[in-house]
Amino acid sequence: MAVLKLQEGHRVPVDPNSREAPLPLTLFRKRRFAGESHPVRNSHANLRATPVGYRARSLTMTSPHDRALLFSKRLYGGRVAFAHGMQDVPNSAKMFFKPIRAVRIDPFTLHLNVVLVRDGGRFPGSWPSSGDALAAIDAAINWTNRIWSGGLLWLERRHTEIHHAPRTFDIRWPLSRVPREWKRPGTIDVVFVNRIGRRDTVARAWPPVGGDTIVVGRATASGEVSDELMGYHLAREVGRLLGIDRGRPPEDPRNLMYRGAPLSVDPSRIHLLPHQVERVHRTLAGTGERRAVRHN
């Protein structure tokens, strides 16, 4: 299986009238690059208003760094294909058995509800104050974005709460200890505590029984966890929460979802596979709570 290396992501406004603007892909109305064409400069939730109409059937991509999500239904629904790199696709049916009705070239946003737990005047790890804690949490979220932005996802801390909760400061079973009232609909809840269990667990997610909740610990039995390692584990749990199979981890230790310890916490040395990106976006394109956390 081909490996897709996802580079550090950032949002750059594109002027669609500029000749220098990159063209991630060109869509064609008919198979084998026939009929009207449309060079895609922006995301389209509905291709009906474009020259290719509602059912584009082939495409070309001209740069190794280009990437796009192709959807079989308007409003970014239905089946999903992740197109990347230099390639010609003469028939979209070879990708997901449907015409292309929506296309996405910039990341979707996932809103995070961040909950920071303290015990009296103590914050997790050696954080001396809430300001230091939130700065480290933002650094971890930024690390996560350096991985997932390449898969067209962007995490944003939208809500923040700080709770004095000694029983949740060091927790053994986060599923039963995270109060229901801490959660917010339409977000992924990320709870930062001091320690999780007795082992070197940094983060855990409990889909679907526990709702869209991830618990991250600042300390383990081996000592305090760095911002980068928190970001690494947060990125992994986002993938698990959004449907990447826990039971079949990749054997490549450079893959984000590898079961063992990471070879590095340098984002440039960690990658995702195309089918992992597709799996996450199939979850977000579906119905129910998971789709509600995806914002355009």
Image (spheres, rainbow, N blue to C red):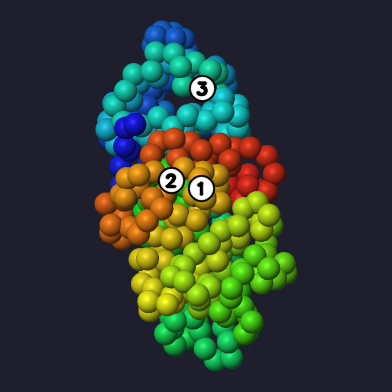
The residue shown at (38%, 70%) is: 227
In the depicted structure, whether residue 46 falls above or below residue 180: above
Q: Is residue 247 above or below residue 213?
A: above
The picture quadrant where one finds residue 169 is bottom right
Q: Residues within 10 Å of mark 3 (few under 14, many from 20)?
A: some
Q: Amino acid at mark 3?
A: Phe
Query: What is the C-alpha distance between the residues marked 3 and 2?
Result: 24 Å
Residue 222: quadrant of the picture:
bottom left
Q: Is residue 271 left or right of residue 235?
A: left
Which of these two is toward me, 246 or 283? 246
Which residue lies at the image location 65% right of the left edge and 51% below the top edge?
Answer: 208
Instruction: Out of 73 and 26, give the one closest to the viewer.
Output: 73
Q: Nearer the viewer, mark 3 or mark 1?
A: 1
**Percent x, y for residue 290?**
63, 47
Q: Position of residue 174 (x, y in %)?
A: 61, 68
Q: Amino acid at mark 1?
A: Arg
Question: Mark 2 = which residue?
Answer: 249
Q: Are marks 2 and 1 in contact (CB under 8 Å)?
A: yes
Q: Secondary structure at mark 1?
A: loop
Q: Which residue is mark 1?
A: 246
Name the residue carrying label 3: 96
From the viewer's side, name the closer residue of 290 and 16.
290
